[in-house]
Image (cartoon, rainbow, N blue to C red):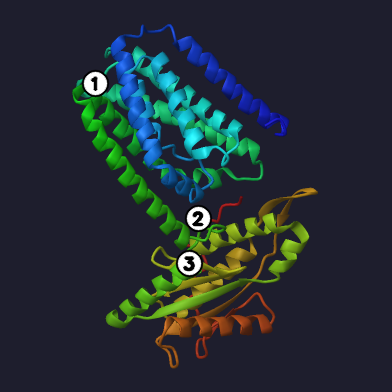
Amino acid sequence: MWSLPRHVLTYVLAVDILAVATTGAMVPVLPVTRADGVAAIILGICAIAHIELSRSIERARKLTSGVGPFVDSLTLWDFAAVIVLPPAVASGLIVFTHTIAWLRVWRGRRPLYRWVFSDATVLLATQAAALVLLIGPAPHPGVPAGLGGLAIILVAAIVRWFVNYALVVGAILISSPGMRAGQVIGEFGEQIIEAGALGLGLGAAGLLKFNPWLLAGIVIGLLALHRGVLLAQYRTSSRTDDKTGLHSADWWHQIAERTLDRARIDNVSLAVLMIDLDLFKKINDTYGHPAGDDVLRVVAHAIESEVRHDDAAGRWGGEEFIVLLPGVDGRELGAIAERIRRRIHVLVIPITTDHGPTSVTDLTVSIGGALWPSAGLSTVDDMVLAADSNLYAAKDEGRNRVKLPDGLDLRTADDHSEPHNRPAEQP
């Protein structure tokens, strides 16, 4: 930890110290009863059972997660504790269960200071949620009744999520200055898992008061949901190119196969564009591979913004991209290809190098197209080979140009060169 940059170390220590201070300040707020102790033991047993039964799932889920905040599986039990226990007992239970999780799941796999920081953000979020429940009209601790009580719980859940999420995102951005906020916020969709965990936490709190034995059903259901989430993450990982966010080559090929089958049935046309960044190796050699990755991401976004929602854009490999366009004729194919070429040529991409900030400009691409139905094209592979052949013909003719199938004159393309969507965002 002490090798961290000074500003990162300051942030981490400040959050840790603040978590200890706020937790200590909440200790005398409410008295602790024997019933609170029994409830804490029951929740603790459920949390430990959950930890033990989901160890391998959690490790695998972490491997397939994005760069954004990782959704902790203990959120359910943490939030249930906030609802039914005094703040001091809830905080103690969180420290205890998270320590068990560290020892049983993460020791040797994550630096201890990171785990302590994560727990500190959870404690701060817990104190914030407890404060909402304390100042609410319903008595606390306990499960509030009626719509008013549900509204208070909802506010507490939102506050808990926001505090934890903001603190973790802040740490990621401070420790990785080269990372764009969009790369972190881009994983926001995964936070729906957190919303589900908070909802289950409310259910667990209610069951604890009604019939604690029913909490076993929560543990079983949670394990099943975790496996479903893990499978979804594996599926997303296999279908998405990690550098650009476009379809992976294998997944694009599967989409293209199904689309070609539908095109045969519906008797509609289908086109493929192969797009290659000209002289991309020079960018990597001049500015470094991280800068090259930034360029690939922005180019991928530019391509996506110039095609229709029904089209499928993928990264074919290296600096080569591929687009599937159902239902286009030769004129439309030429117009779309030209829009992509022109859009990429005017990009200004800020990058950071060892010598300071600069920009990559004057990018050019060579584009080859293929259109089905055409003689000699009967499969997706045939279309890809034809588009690739035209791509290399475009390069042989001088780069920065579009080469369409024989018989299609690019000069007659319907040149509506305004983009369909907003301009590509810069990193």
Residue placed most toward the observer, 29 or 181: 29
Residue 61 lies, with reference to residue 424, above or below; the image says: above
Q: Mark 2: which amino acid?
A: Arg
Q: Which residue lies at the image location 61% right of the left edge and 64% below the top edge?
A: 344
Outermost residue toward the right in this view = 355
Instruction: Give percent across and percent down for residue 193.
Output: 37, 41
Between the residue at mark 3 and the residue at mark 2, the CA separation in whole angstroms equals 17 Å
Q: Measure the alpha-carbon separation of dots 1 and 2.
A: 42 Å
Circle nearer the N terminus (3, 1) = 1
Alpha carbon separation for disc pair 3 and 1: 48 Å
Residue 355 x %, y %: 80, 49
Amino acid residing under circle 3: Ala
Q: Which residue is mark 2?
A: 422
Write the residue at 43% across / 42% down: 55
The mark lying in front, picked from 1 and 2, is 1
Q: Which residue is at a point 72% across and 63% down the rendered structure image?
A: 283
Q: Is residue 312 left or right of residue 395?
A: left
Dot 1 or dot 2: first in sequence order is 1
**Secondary structure under the numbered disc 2 in the rendered image:** loop
Label 3, on which residue?
A: 313
Q: Label 1, on which residue?
A: 148
| In the foreground, 382 or 374 | 382
Q: Is residue 408 visible?
A: yes
Name the mark nearer the viewer: 3 or 2.
3
